[in-house]
Image: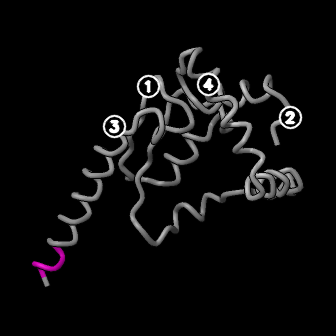
Amino acid sequence: GIPDMKTARLVFRQMFGGIPAPMLYLGQHSLQDLFQRRVVREFVANMMDADPEKELLRAADLRDLPVPAGLVWGLNDQFLPEGSLEFFRENLPGAPALLLKRCGHLPQRERPMAVLHFLRMFAARLAARSAQRVGVS
């Protein structure tokens, strides 16, 4: 969990890319509450107990996805390890990507309209591709 407000502020800054100080102050309590939930505590505990040599997500898992994938990424993400964006781009070849400046780990919260627009375009592209396949048959 998040033991104190100082830690809550640190995690909040890591998760959000460019958050104004008043929002940081208001959000830190809800973030601390979130990390007190049982499901989140169990997830964090499992991550802490996990074998550091064991990969959480393997490159082959991404390359073998049975469904189309797109990538939405906040370029100011400080929550995931450095090199994570490159890992996903390399292992999701050809996946459309929305890379957002001044955005952290939660683009759906920080830039919801941009994410919505990307998802609609992605869905339309998939629908068009599916219609072409049906029309060809």
Q: In the drawing, what numbered circle is on residue 114?
A: 3
Q: CA distance from mark 2 to mark 1?
A: 31 Å
Q: Earlier in the sequence, mark 2 or mark 4?
A: 2
Which residue is rendered at x = 52% and y = 68% of the image?
64
Q: Earlier in the sequence, mark 4 or mark 3?
A: 4
1 in magenta? no
Q: Nearer the viewer, mark 2 or mark 4?
A: 4
Marks 2 and 1: CB-CB under 8 Å?
no
135 in magenta? yes
Q: Which residue is mark 4?
A: 26
Marks 4 and 3: CB-CB under 8 Å?
no
Q: Which residue is mark 1?
A: 101
- Taking depth in this image into account, of 41 and 134 the one nearest to the observer is 41
Report the amino acid beneath label 2.
Pro
Q: Which residue is mark 2?
A: 3
How many C-alpha atoms fall within 10 Å of the one at disc 2: few (<14), some, or many (≥20)?
A: few
Q: Earlier in the sequence, mark 4 or mark 1?
A: 4
Q: In the drawing, what numbered circle is on residue 129?
A: none
Q: What is the span of residues highlighted in magenta in the rendered image?
A: 132-136
Q: CA distance from mark 3 to mark 1?
A: 11 Å
Q: CA distance from mark 2 to mark 3?
A: 34 Å
Q: Nearer the viewer, mark 4 or mark 3?
A: 4
Report the amino acid beneath label 4.
Leu
Residue 16 appears left or right of 29: left
Q: Nearer the viewer, mark 2 or mark 3?
A: 2
Label tally: 4
